[in-house]
Image (cartoon, rainbow, N blue to C red):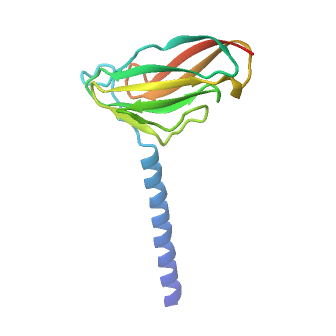
Amino acid sequence: MKKIDTTLIVIIIITFVVFAGIIFAALKLNPEAKKYSASDSTKPKIEISEDNFDFGKMKTTEIKTKKVAIKNIGGAGLDIRNFSTSCDCTYLFVIINGQKSPKFSMANNPEWSRELAPGENAELEIAYEPRIMPVEGEVSRTVLFSTNDPDKTEVEINFKADVSK
């Protein structure tokens, strides 16, 4: 009888440790950004150099890139996360203090997020590579990401290009 009690206690402890590890990992991989209201005087605030641009005429064999500056002009840390694109032919990197993020495309990377301190800048290096999803004519693509700026929790940057063979 004592061996069964010991085995049961060990199983309960192992189960508890496994579940605690799963919960800890889930919280660490997708931490919640601090939330602010629009009326908070010390809220984060994103400034984007442009949210709509045109790559112009390009061949399907070309790759064009554009750097879009973002800045936290608010009074609290600006969390940026959940980067994705509307097509795998579009991808981006986030560059902060010379360090480049992983590559983001259609499948976002929820594990990656960063906080921009008040006054801190970052660059989004957006690339369009039409050969990945060959189309001709005028195309429109989108880059998406989330912030904790209460006035702009979802950011959308749109571009177009006129693609030919």
Q: Residue, x 35% and y 33% (percent of image)? A: 97
Q: Residue, x 38% and y 28% (percent of image)? A: 148
Q: Which quadrant holds the C terminus?
A: top right
Within the image, what quadrant is residue 46 found in?
top left
In the displayed structure, 149 sits above or below 107; it is above
Q: Nearer the viewer, residue 102 or 60?
A: 60
Within the image, what quadrant is residue 99 found in?
top left
Total numbered labels? 0
Q: Nearer the viewer, residue 36 or 117?
A: 117
Question: Could you tell me residue 15's position as x and y percent?
Answer: 50, 67
Q: Residue, x 38% and y 32% (percent of image)? A: 96
Q: Residue, x 64% and y 24% (percent of image)? A: 129
136 on left or right of 74 = right
In the displayed structure, 21 sits above or below 36; it is below
139 on left or right of 29 = right
Question: Could you tell me residue 16's position as x and y percent?
Answer: 46, 66
Question: Could you tell me residue 71's position as x and y percent?
Answer: 35, 22
Question: Could you tell me residue 82's position as x and y percent?
Answer: 50, 33
